[in-house]
Image (spheres, rainbow, N blue to C red):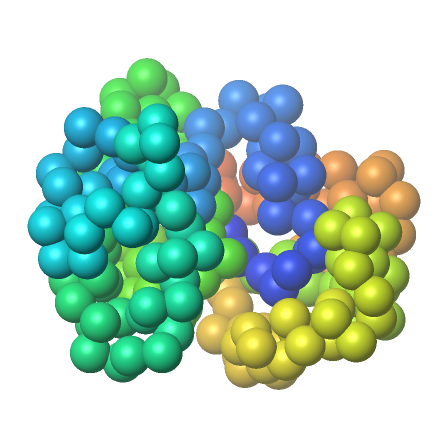
Amino acid sequence: MIIGLTGGIASGKSTVANAFAELGIGWVDADHIAREVVEPGEPALAEILARHGPSIIDASGQLKRSALRAIVFADEEERRWLESVTHPRIRDRLYQRLDGLLASRSPYVLLVSPLLFESGQVSMVDRCLVIDVPENIQIARTCQRDDVDENQARAIIAAQMPRAERLSRADDVIVNDGDLTSLTDQVANLDRRYRDIIAHSTLPPER
């Protein structure tokens, strides 16, 4: 079973994933894979370089993310082209990593993705777990963690999927508005639930 774990900025996705890891559950971060597929030597970076020229890489051959971001934000066609180059590769690599974790006897695995719904990666998972946090806490955590002011934090939150919509698409919810003990208790409860679902399931996961 693959659980999609998502949430807005500063909701505590990595903290929750690490709490599951303490219980023997493997996880893969979609953001890390997205960075991997455009590293030097990767076919996706070669395609991007061929299309946009050397101005989008630095002296060490690394992708200048800010330069590419400026291009795709200004041109919808370029954004769609970039997604056509990167998304299939991200998806294939995610499946490889997830299958590897399942083969290593993790009873289920987590796909941690801030854009689980927006990217279409939701089609890869069997259940969706949303980490929810009140907006005032999100703002405070974002300001502290990322050293931004309140207006910037609000703008980031406004650009993400609305909280109500995210919650409406959840199979399970963890509310991360308390201390670490409360969070790990919720993780432990869900871990027991997921293991019970697997124990009573007779259907293999779909691909």
* Residue located farthest toward the top when viewing the structure as drawn: 104
Residue nearest the viewer, comparing 125 with 14: 14
155 up-or-down from 50: above or below: below
Is residue 75 shown left or right of residue 22?
A: left
Seen from the viewer's position, the closer of residues 81 and 109 is: 81
Residue 55 to residue 22: above or below: below
Point out residue 81 in the picture as x, y percentages from the top left corner. Answer: 16, 67
Answer above or below: position of 3 versus 128. above
Left or right of residue 167, residue 80 in this image: left
Give the residue displayed 50% in from the left and 52% down from the top: 5
Residue 133, located in which quarter of the rendered image? bottom right
User: Relative to 190, is 102 on the left or the right?
Assistant: left
The residue nearer to you, when weighing 49 against 194, is: 49
Residue 167 visible in the picture: yes
Residue 3, visible in the rendered structure = no
Residue 114 location, x and y as percent? 50, 57
Task: Name the residue rendered at 89%, 44% in the picture.
Answer: 179
* Residue 130 falls in image quadrant: bottom right
* Above or below 80: residue 18: above
Name the residue rendered at 69%, 49% in the picture: 12
Q: Quadrant of the N terminus?
A: top left
Count of numbered tags: 0
Left or right, 186 with reference to 181: left
The picture places residue 176, in percent across and down from the top left corner, at 77, 55
Give the percent coordinates (x, y) of residue 141. Answer: 82, 55
Name which residue lies at 54% across and 82% down: 165
